[in-house]
Structure formats: structure tokens, C-alpha cells
Image (cartoon, rainbow, N blue to C red):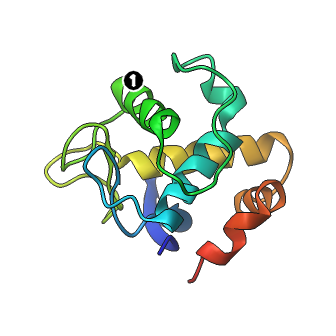
Amino acid sequence: MAKISKRFIFGGKEALKVKFMNISDSVGVGGVNSLDDVILVQALFKISEEQLSNKLKVPKPFPYPTGAYNEQTENLIFEFQLRNSWDVKGKWLICPAKGLFKPGTRELWTIHLLDDYLLDSATLISKDKFEAMYDKFPNTLFLFRE
């Protein structure tokens, strides 16, 4: 089940513990693609559509978050990772974040990058990122357990 996880962000001499939206299993080509994890990934793409649409070569509108893994979702993952990051288990697959960086690298997990876009999108409308997600997609509220 999708969940709220915590990660440390280091700045200067101090570390901040911040909450982020995380998946519990892989989403993408060859992934588990459980409904709740897919709906979270779709919602993260959809809420960041304005910011991402100029960076990704995929047709708009991005799919509404339904939890059904489909070709549009696959294309979004492909384009996003092609331009940003691949996860440890392979490209075109979003894995749950475990720690700040992927093992043996200084690269952020794809889910961290998507959560960062959510934060940017929420900031543009002066809302907390969790509030922005729930307001825009009430069907995601059931996903999160601390």
C-alpha cells in the first residue's frame, strides 16, 4: 500500500527529516503495479502536469489517477526516467525508496523526484503538498498511512 515515508535532507550542518509519498511495490514495465501504487504514481504525474509537460515528450492531458496501469502511464515513466533518473532494478520501473539515495550511488529515487515536483506544484498554489494532493484527487486519501 502506498504510504507516507520519511527521508533526511542534509543542508549545511543539519539534517531535516521530511515526509514524502512512497510506493510499497514497483510500478512500471515488469513491476507489481498494484492499484494503490499506480494511483499514487499517476497522481504525482497529474498534479505536476504543468511543470512536466514541457519537459516530457508525451501527449497531454496526463491520465487521471485511476490505478489502472496503462500505456499512458508507461510512457510517462519512460519519458520521466529517460530525462531524470532510472531506479536500481531497471529502467522504466519506479521502485519504492529505501533511504535517500539508490544503493551505491548519489542519485535520488524516482519517487523522490516525483514527490519534489509535487512540493513545487503545491508551493505554486500556497498549499502543503499533502493537502494539494488530497484537494485535487480525493480518491487518493485512502492510500496513506503513517
User: What is the x, y in percent for residue 17?
Assistant: 51, 69
Residue 7 or 55: which is nearer the viewer?
Answer: 55
Q: Secondary structure at mark 1?
A: helix
- Residue 22 appears anywhere in the view: no
Residue located 54% across and 20% down the image = 58
**Left or right position of 85 against 139:** left
- Residue 142 appears anywhere in the view: yes
| Amino acid at circle 1 | Arg
Residue picked out by circle 1: 83
The quadrant of the image that shows the C terminus is bottom right
User: What is the x, y in percent for residue 133?
Assistant: 73, 57
On screen, 15 above or below 60? below
Other-residue count near label 1 (Cα within 10 Å), few / some / many at <14 / 14–19 / ≥20:
few
Residue located 34% across and 58% down the image = 100
Residue 145 figure quarter: bottom right
Residue located 48% across and 71% down the image = 6
- How many tags in the picture? 1
Residue 105 figure quarter: top left
Residue located 32% across and 55% down the image = 95
**Left or right position of 34 against 119:** left
Residue 65 or 132: which is nearer the viewer?
Answer: 65
User: What is the x, y in percent for residue 75?
Assistant: 44, 30
**Left or right position of 128 against 19:** right
User: What is the x, y in percent for residue 15?
Assistant: 45, 64
Residue 121 or 58: which is nearer the viewer?
Answer: 58
**Left or right position of 124 against 43:** right
